[in-house]
Amino acid sequence: YLHPGREGCPPDAGHSVELHLLEKNIPGGSSEEDASEMPVAAPDDPSRWTPIEREAYLIGSLIQEWMAAGRALPDGRPLAFRDVVILVRAAKVNAERMASILTAMGIPTYANVGGALFGTREVRDVVAALQVLDNPRQDIPLAAILRSGILVEPFSEDDLVEIRRLDRGIPFHEAAREYVAKGAQDELRHRLDSLWRRIERFRQNVRRRPLAEVLWELYQEQGFLAYTCGLPRGEQRQANLLRLHELSRKFGSFRRQGLHRFLRFIESLEQEDRQPATAPAIGESENVVRIMSIHQSKGLEFPVVFLAGLGTQFNLGDRTGRMIFERRAGIGLRVVDVERMIEYPSLVHAQVVAEIERQTRAEELRVLYVAMTRARDKLVMVGSKRGVERVEDGTETTADLWPFSNLSIASAVTPLDWLIPVLSAGSAGAVREPGPRVGGRPTVEVKLHDAAEIADWSLRRHSRDREDAARTAAARGEALPADEPYAPDDAEVDRVVQRLDYVYPRLAAGTVRAAMAASEFKGIFDLATSPNRRVKAAATPDAGPANRGPRDALLRDESAERGTIMHRVLQHLDFTVATDAAGVASELQRLKLAGVVGDGD
């Protein structure tokens, strides 16, 4: 059983438990069922947020309120972000959405639940660029790179419309090519011409060089890596791009390589739902709010715990299907009446369904117990429910529901179906429900948030508040807020530049190993295996047959000498120039002047 209170807790520590109930029925709102299909939350329209995103906003507001008030823990230590943990039942589904809301509110958040790397915007832009390098005759990837700015300065929507207007009867990629010669706007024609030249150059590079090198050059060409760092959650975006580059580097060690195969590899990972997780930009040990599943929190204790998603329905999907199985109840089959063309559950099927529901609710009770016992100093429970006003006026639950009957427990669909009746039937003074303060300090405080209050929430307001504080301080000539970045003085800038421009004076010594094997020294002085020694001898004017050294004595065999020369030429040949006979002749002349080969070679 759970017993309220903790030994050694100061009397002014505040309410140990809070229950926040949010109205789920928001006009035009979304439910958790379609959460996976929803885009990123609209900053100023809470009706488009999912219930878990509204709960994240409430949690973020409470955290900001406590941090601004300088709230301290019972041991006297100031509250820090690392003291706060948010527990959810299904972290894989909810953690990423909660983290995006909290991050937008300026709260550092860590959620080690992975995520779809190829689904992030910055990685999609890079993959689109790779698709164009593989095959430029693709409309959607081409439009994506025009808007992203990864190869050229970003094109506006008006620019795309202008390109499309050139000839609506041809594909977009053909219109983009023809606009270079027939377009009406000179500046747009020059930009498209630069784009196609750059695409062709990268297409040649990707055929001759490792994919990882070309991808890194793609990052650096227009400063795309630095550009993504300046976007919201820039550190996370940069980490995702670096993870994609690391994936391309590992792919370079595969037996079958190439850009086309790499794109097919990415496509197969997406189709099989095996794509890599997004890269964590910050670590769990830093001063961040952590989001984790209830199962991950087993055996751990945290100063402040937020338990979210209490209005989410239990997963009873195992009870559906024509044939279901439960270890104790056995196999349940539905009856199919072929003559009347109907199907209905058999008695055994209904018995197995009842047993699955009972086992599922028993597991949910155990999980709820684990979640409610993770907090050391403060527990805040948050859930969304339709019709929260019925909780306030007492029509939702009454005290005669306690003690619970088996039927009451078995009919619960969400954790709130257990918590609200228990709190409503609590002893006098143990629970403070919405309304005037009565009696002493309660053990649990219930707070309601109706649709009107939720409609006034805004993510932009939090960023505007921070900006307004900085502007006000600057207008009054006061010191900027402590967390506001500022321009350093000249002396500090000079010190940073000196560190960046510093060149180690003994750089060559850094390549000399402290220990070498005797066999390695043999290779250094073995002229027969050192092509560079022969290059210098052959490049001298008097390097005739009479002046040949010991190396030439070892290479009497004409075939062996021809093979050595061939390997040396291939090692130094520039294949971007040597594309035909004239190019090869030009390269041989360059190698001769450089001393790589001699006249006789």
Image (cartoon, rainbow, N blue to C red):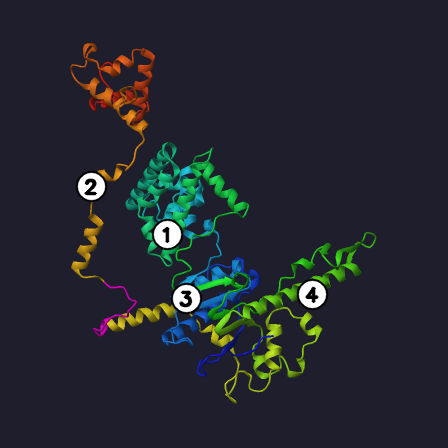
**Callout 1: SS:** helix
Quadrant position of residue 137: top left
Q: Taking 262 as reference, is 402 left or right?
A: right
Q: Is any atom of residue 473 visible in this view?
A: yes
Distance, label 1 to label 4, CA atoms, is 47 Å
Q: Which residues are magenta?
A: 474-486
The first of marks 3 and 2 along the sequence is 3
Q: Is any atom of residue 575 visible in this view?
A: no
Q: Which marked residue is nearer to the observer: mark 4 or mark 2? A: 2
Q: Are marks 4 and 2 in contact (CB under 8 Å)?
A: no
Quadrant position of residue 477: bottom left
Residue 369 percent location from the top left of the image: 58, 69
Residue 476 shown in magenta: yes
Residue at image mark 3: 82
Along the viewing direction, whichever of 84 and 508 lies nearer the viewer: 508
The amino acid sitting under disc 1 is Gln
Q: Are marks 4 and 3 in contact (CB under 8 Å)?
A: no
**Callout 4: SS:** helix
The numbered dot on residue 506 is: 2
**Above or below for 23 versus 359:** below
The amino acid sitting under disc 2 is Arg
The first of marks 3 and 1 along the sequence is 3
The numbered dot on residue 358 is: 4
